[in-house]
Amino acid sequence: MHPPEPTEIHVSTVKDDKGVLGILSIHTTEGLLDIALDREAPDAIVNAIRSIKSELKRKD
């Protein structure tokens, strides 16, 4: 079994009484995945993606 593959990616923001959050919506082959992001989360995701890209290049 393979993990779901992204087919579309959208970004937006929402504001409530606690502040503003970024929303990363990823449509996948298995359905919709919405992820709420605070101010620190995007940097952590970018760092994780860089690490994955480096690993993939190394294994090519």
Image (spheres, helix red, strand yellow):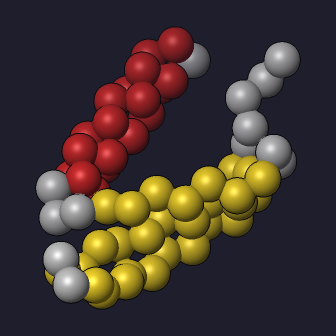
Task: Name the residue: 30% across, 49% down.
Answer: 46
Vertical comparison of 25 with 55: above or below: below
Q: Quadrant of residue 53?
A: top left
Vertical comparison of 53 with 20: above or below: above
Q: Quadrant of residue 27?
A: bottom right
Residue furthest out toward the top: 59
Vertical comparison of 18 with 60: above or below: below
Task: Name the residue: 82% across, 48% down.
Answer: 29
Q: Position of residue 39 (x, y in %)?
A: 16, 64
Number of numbered discs overlaid on the protein picture: 0
Q: Position of residue 17 (x, y in %)?
A: 21, 84
Residue 1 visible in rendering: yes
Task: Name the residue: 57% across, 18% down.
Answer: 60
- Horizontal side of residue 58 vs 19, given as left or right: right
Vertical comparison of 60 with 24: above or below: above
Q: Quadrant of residue 33?
A: bottom right
- Horizontal side of residue 47 vs 55, given as left or right: left
Residue 50 visible in rendering: no
Task: Name the residue: 18% across, 77% down.
Answer: 18
Q: Nearer the viewer, residue 16 or 51?
A: 16
Q: Where, quadrant-wise, is the N terminus in this rendering?
A: top right
Q: Position of residue 55 (x, y in %)?
A: 42, 20
Q: Nearer the viewer, residue 36 or 10?
A: 36
Q: Nearer the viewer, residue 46 or 14?
A: 14
- Horizontal side of residue 48 vs 11, given as left or right: left
Residue furthest out toward the front: 17
Q: Nearer the viewer, residue 35 or 1?
A: 35
